[in-house]
Image (cartoon, helix red, strand yellow):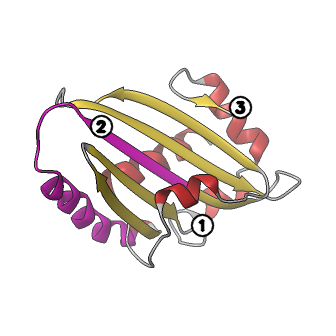
Amino acid sequence: MKKGLLLMGVALLLTGCGGKELTKDEDIIKKDYTNKFECTRTEKMYNGNGEVTITKIYDFNKEGDKLLEYYEIATYTYTKDVDMNEEKSKYLEGCESGKEYGYINCKASVKDNVLTVSKEADLNHENNKEEASTMTKESIAKDYEEGETYTCK
């Protein structure tokens, strides 16, 4: 389970996604969920130009035994001047390659020195279906509990 969770997260970060239009990033965070589980981590960017905060949002049924939705939001806060439109374009190009990995939504937005990329996994896609069908709120909470990278609520 932990390996699958890690692979899903890495694939989301590296490849992006494509498909139908998402609502605003704030709407994903503030929307009503049936049984939400959210984990966040913040780390320095690999190039030393700021930090990135990764938020993973899982929505389960009331019983917590079926995953209904999975979102990942990466917020890049730049400390040095960069062309934010160019950065946004790079991430949007990556969104197209995510289709083959099973992502139906990807959106990038820029405000001041902050780039936000939102992604949603297609839980019925062949790359996600098996993992999503066995994931429970209890199992995902246990996986995160064993790690030290994310803070969950």
Q: Are marks 2 and 3 in contact (CB under 8 Å)?
A: no
Query: Tag 3: Cα neighbours inside 10 Å, few (<14), some, or many (≥20)?
Result: few
Asked whether residue 112 is drawn in magenta, I would say no
| Residue type beneath disc 2 | Thr
Q: Residue furthest top?
A: 148
Mark 1 sits on what residue?
Answer: 123
86 falls in the magenta region: yes
Q: Is residue 105 above or below residue 51?
A: below
Q: Residue at x 29, y 68 (%)?
A: 97
Near mark 1 (Cα within 10 A), the count class, few <14, some 14-19 or many ≥20, is: many
Q: Quadrant of the C terminus?
A: top right
- The residue drawn where x is 52% and y is 63% is 121
Q: State the residue at coordinates (31%, 51%).
A: 14
Q: Is residue 52 above or below residue 133?
A: above
Q: Amino acid at mark 1?
A: Leu
| Residue at the right extreme of this rendering | 63
Between 130 and 138, the one lying in front of the other is: 138
The image quarter in which residue 44 lies: top left
Pointer 2 with pointer 1, Cβ within 8 A: no
Between the residue at mark 2 and the residue at mark 3, the CA separation in whole angstroms equals: 30 Å
Across and down, in percent, residue 13 comes to 37, 49
Q: Nearer the viewer, mark 2 or mark 3?
A: 2
Residue on which the image places disc 3: 142
> Residue sitting at 62 percent across and 43 percent down?
1
Query: Where residue 49 sits in the image (x, y, percent)?
Result: 18, 30
Q: SS of the residue at dot 2? A: strand
Marks 2 and 1, Cα distance to the nearest angstrom? 29 Å
Magenta residues (range): 71-100
| Mark 3, secondary structure of its residue | helix
